[in-house]
Amino acid sequence: MANRLPRYRRSETPPNIRNFVAYIPLLKMISDFHYMNTPQIVALAETCKTNTYDKLQKLYHNGLVERLYYPQFGDTFPTLIYALTRKGADILRDLEPEKYNDVYYPRDPRSYIFVKHELMISNIRAVLLRGLREKSNGEVTAWAVDQAIIDLFPKLKNHRLIPDGYFAVKTKKGTVHYFIEADRGTMTVSRFNDKITRYRLFFRKNRKELPARFRVLTVTPTPPRTTNLRKIALDNKEDKASRFVFCDETQFSLESPLALLRYII
């Protein structure tokens, strides 16, 4: 029987990777998402669960992906989180220099709060992709985070806005565009109100340059938080209520992805 590989440290004798081409889609997906936990990867992988687990093991023990974990009180086996390593980034850069010239990988240790926020954004994307795959009624034609959003919409800087994400979904009815606000419940109500005001000003001043169907999707951790933030957006009489869309993480999941689509499409 083969020796069991350690979970939280790399093996001194990593298993061989045969047919490396089969591992590239997994490397690319983790790179595109920045951070993904195991359930997210399994939900989107093109192979079965057992095969995906095996590939993740080999990628980790060969130093191509980082395996992060943040033990919480009472967690015997915390969910593993994956990100690219420099070695993995170098391989993608060699394969496709133009696309992966500035590929993301964590240069320094990241706090649990930071990674949890990143995972929230990854989960929105994973649920969206899984829902569209299940429904077969649309496709994600654009996705951007960080500086890539500013590159697409440079006038956001004039309003001191940096959305957590941007995506576009094309359906038979046309294309809808969304900025994402992944709210962890840490922002004060007054700060959120200020952000909503800046979004309204951005859309009003740039309406001729922006697509017609452009909204802001705010995802919160709990229903009460959603209710409070929605009230702030709807209290303002200047803007159409449909510009701002709210939901919380309890309303959708990788197992029930269609619930998120109802808010978006």
Image (spheres, grey):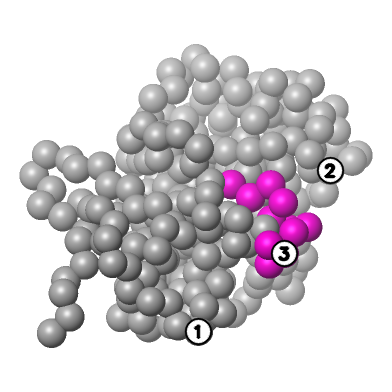
First of labels 1, 3 by sequence position: 1
SS for callout 3: loop
Using the rendered image of the protein, determine whether residue 253 is visible from the camera's viewpoint.
no
Residue type, mark 1 in image: Asn
Residue range in magenta is: 94-104
219 is higher (above) or lower (below) than 108: below
**Residue 102 belongs to the span the image colors magenta:** yes
Q: Which residue is drawn at 42% across and 58% down?
A: 63
**Tag nearer the camera, 3 or 2:** 3
Number of the label disc, if any, that sits on residue 210: 2
Q: Where is residue 214 in the image (x, y as percent from the top left)?
A: 73, 46
Please name the residue shown 79% across and 43% down the image. 152
Report x, y in % for residue 252.
39, 58
Q: Which residue, as the protein is rendered here, is positioned at the far top?
A: 190
Q: Which dot, 2 or 1, sits closer to the camera?
A: 1
- The residue that appears at 81% across and 33% down in the rendered structure is 154
List the residue tagged with mark 1. 19
| Residue at x-position 59% and y-position 47% | 104
Q: Nearer the viewer, residue 146 or 89?
A: 89
Q: Mark 3 points at which residue?
A: 96
